[in-house]
Image (cartoon, rainbow, N blue to C red):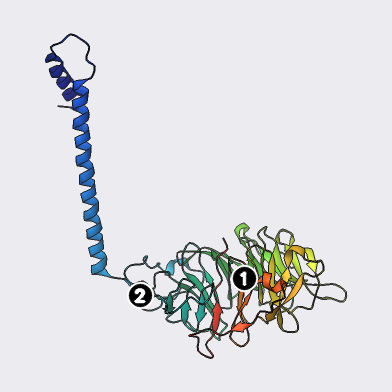
Amino acid sequence: MTEDELERALRQTLAGRVATSRPLAADPAGAALRRARAAGRRRTLAGLALAGVATVLVTTGMAQLGGPTGHSGTPTVVLGDPGGFAPSPLPTASSPAPAQGPVRAELDLIAGSRLDTSGGERRELTGLSAVERAQRVPDYGGWLITSAATPAGRTLWWVPPNGSDPQVLLAGADAVVVAADGRQVAWRDGAYLAAAGVVGGQLLASSRTAAPEGATPIGFAGDAVLVRQPDRGGVSVWRRPAGGVPGAANPDVLGVYGTLPDGRVVGLVSAGTPRRPCVALLDPGRELTPVRTGCGPAVATDGLGAVSADGRWLLLNAAPRNALLVDLANLGAAATTHPAGPAVAGAVAWTRDGAALHVDATGGLVRVRPDRVLAGEAPSASRLDGVAAGERLVVVADTRS
């Protein structure tokens, strides 16, 4: 019997038992049906809850029996090949042990082959050596770490967030650059320039183009790759989503430090009379044509430096080998540069609250806070507890929000 037939029969039975001819103030059949349906729903919810508990218990049991999968060996991925790696599972019972003692920096640090995160975790990075730069991956996606140049080329590792061993994404590359948002990477692969997106520890949607010998990627402007041409030939823009080859190079561009929130590139150009290196804002849509230039104190051409996340400040080296803080909002006006402590010896990383961290030639960590620099404070280097003498220290760049 269907539910409709059952409802009609129940209504007829109850109606036949009603002795009075007055209209009923309530519907006894409807009330009975509503009570029956409510009881049925309670039984259904109880069954679902028991099923959910059982599922959780079974899953937990499987996780405890199986344990973390781990990885045997370090897989080598062919340059530009996204198919050689499968990402590790999400964290299970084997989470990294918290670091002993207080957090010592606002950003993650790599000391030798050890990662100390700003959240208090400490991890040994098995298989890593000669780290030069490191970048967080967005959405808690781990870290991308680039080695210094070696006779075998450069290596790019992805460090999973779940405590698994680092994985090799690129090996033997002539040059590697990671975007400030941690979502793209470009590299020199033999006679080609290549670039790809980074998702879940894999290189996806890769593309490549032929390039002159010695041309190397040095940065990103959105999805476009900035390419330094050989023999002081300037910098060109490779708009890889549109295909083709890098556009005409601007021979006056000596290097780049990053981008502003509006997409303009902050770089170093040869300008003035006589010609000298000057900080400039460049338009990537017009072959890096300068739209504003500031020629203040002599600046170094070593390429070390970085732009703050809000686009207000640039920290770079001055020619006399000390750090210099440049106010990009007033570039070209008077008093836009300020001495900012010891010279930069490696990567510069900006915190989200507007401080720059870098390592000086002595291996000490330097914090540059623009408000304090403007107030006349001279930043200085400090030694970190737990970092051995001679141990290479690298500040990890945070992701751009």
Query: Where is 262 relative to 65, above or below?
Result: above
| Residue in front for this viewpoint, 102 or 389 | 102
The C terminus sits in image quarter = bottom right
Q: Which mark is residue 71?
A: 2
| Residue in front for this viewpoint, 283 or 390 | 390
First along the sequence among labels 2 and 1: 2
Residue for point 85% across, 72% down: 272
Q: Tell me residue 328's x, y (percent).
A: 73, 66
Element class at badge 1? loop
Residue 250 seen anywhere in this rendered image of the structure: no
Give the distance between the C-alpha atoms of the residues marked 2 and 1, in whole angstroms. Answer: 38 Å
Element class at badge 2? loop
Amino acid type for the residue under numbered disc 2: His
Residue located beneath label 1 in the image: 355
Amino acid type for the residue under numbered disc 1: Ala
Q: Mark 2 or mark 1, which is nearer to you?
A: 1
Residues at discs 2 and 1 in contact (Cβ within 8 Å): no
Residue for point 22% across, 20% down: 27
Q: Tell me residue 350's x, y (percent).
A: 60, 70
Residue for point 14% across, 18% down: 14
Residue for point 49% across, 71% down: 143
Relative to 285, 139 lies left or right? left
Q: Quadrant of residue 228?
A: bottom right
Badge 1: residue crowd in 10 Å (few <14, some 14–19, many ≥20)? some
